[in-house]
């Protein structure tokens, strides 16, 4: 035991400068942590709450090929698609909002869109 103790003491004296710097760094870091914790107790802030508006989904005027122009004022689209594409979306979907009015195609139901060769988009639910 004495031999091991003497080895530790000799190692400390050999590396005295590094031991002092390391110990000082640990003490300063510990003090900074303690003062930060004490300071932070007085700065408690309420958490941020994100509120989303509760609105009805956007409904675009619906025109189907069979009904013509009269349907624009009578009904709303349940799903929309582009005449240039093969996917259909709910009107509230960001992709649906990007479809130009002249390319917009309306569908009354899922079956209506599927019968016309469209597939439901997995991007928007």
Image: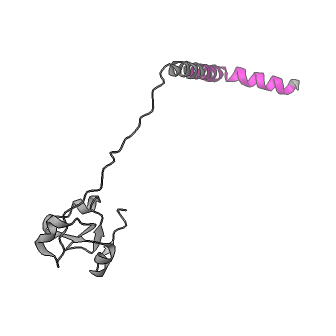
**Residue visible at 51% across and 22% down?**
40
* Res 31 quadrant in image: top right
**Residue visible at 30% across and 66% down?**
89
Residue 10 highlighted magenta (yes or no): yes
Q: Give the camera-side residue of 83 and 61.
A: 61
Q: How many circles with numbers are drawn on the protein?
A: 0
Quadrant housing the N terminus: top right
* Res 9 quadrant in image: top right
**Residue visible at 73% across and 25% down?**
11
> Residue 71's x, y, as percent?
16, 70
Residue numbers of the magenta segment: 3-29
> Residue 50's x, y, as percent?
38, 40
* Res 23 quadrant in image: top right
**Residue visible at 19% across and 67% down?**
62
Residue 65, relative to residue 97: is it above or below? below
Q: Give the camera-side residue of 17 and 20.
A: 20
Q: Give the camera-side residue of 30 and 81.
A: 81
Left or right of 72? Residue 3 is right
């Amino acid at each position: 035991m004495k031999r091991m103790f003497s080895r530790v003491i000799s190692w400390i004296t050999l590396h005295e400068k590094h031991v002092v710097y390391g110990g000082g760094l640990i003490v300063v870091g510990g003090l900074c942590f303690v003062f930060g914790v004490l300071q932070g107790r007085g700065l408690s802030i309420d958490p941020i709450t994100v509120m989303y508006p509760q609105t009805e989904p956007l409904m675009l005027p619906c025109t189907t090929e069979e009904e013509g122009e009269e349907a624009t004022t009578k009904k709303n689209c349940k799903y929309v698609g582009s005449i240039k594409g093969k996917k259909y979306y709910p009107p509230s979907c960001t992709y649906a909002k990007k479809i130009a009015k002249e390319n917009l195609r309306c569908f009354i139901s899922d079956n209506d869109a599927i019968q016309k060769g469209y597939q439901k988009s997995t991007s928007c639910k």
